[in-house]
Image: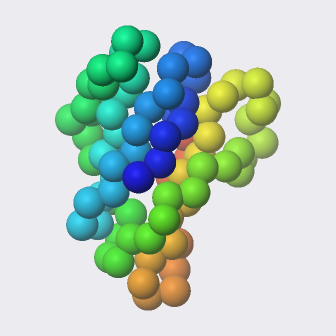
Amino acid sequence: MSVRDVNGDGIPDILLPSEADVQIALGNGNGTFQILQTNFGVGPGWGQILLQNLHGQSPKAGVPDMVSPDSTGGIAVLINTTK
């Protein structure tokens, strides 16, 4: 599990790994969260979720990309296109 603002609104969100997916719970700013209905596939054997600026967006944008290593020696990269 990782906690970080992933949609650029300044409120911490939670990334919840399960099976071969990552589910995102967006923070409401009052200690509660709204779970998105969309799961993001990261492949078999997901590992730790890493959040990093990978495609050159401004660090001030506050919208990190997601990387998840898997047990096959590969990685899944999910580019964050939130505006």
Residue 24: give x, y in percent of width and height: 35, 39
Relative placement, left or right, of 77 versus 46 is right
Residue 7: give x, y in percent of width and height: 51, 27
Q: Number of marks in the image?
A: 0
**Residue 31 seen in render:** yes
Rendering colour mode: rainbow
Q: Is residue 54 above or below residue 10?
A: below
Residue 72: give x, y in percent of width and height: 44, 87
| Quadrant occupied by the C terminus | top right
The residue drawn where x is 47% and y is 48% is 2
Q: Is residue 71 above or below residue 13?
A: below
Residue 79: give x, y in percent of width and height: 56, 47
| Residue 32 lies in quadrant | top left
Q: Residue furthest left?
A: 37
Relative placement, left or right, of 52 versus 68 is right
Q: Residue furthest bottom?
A: 72
Q: Residue furthest front?
A: 31
Q: Is residue 50 above or below residue 79?
A: below
Relative placement, left or right, of 11 versus 15 is right
The residue drawn where x is 44% and y is 77% is 70
The residue drawn where x is 39% and y is 71% is 46
Q: Is residue 1 above or below residue 48?
A: above
Relative placement, left or right, of 13 versus 81 is left
The residue drawn where x is 32% and y is 76% is 44
* Observer-nearest of 33 and 70: 33
**Residue 7 seen in render:** no
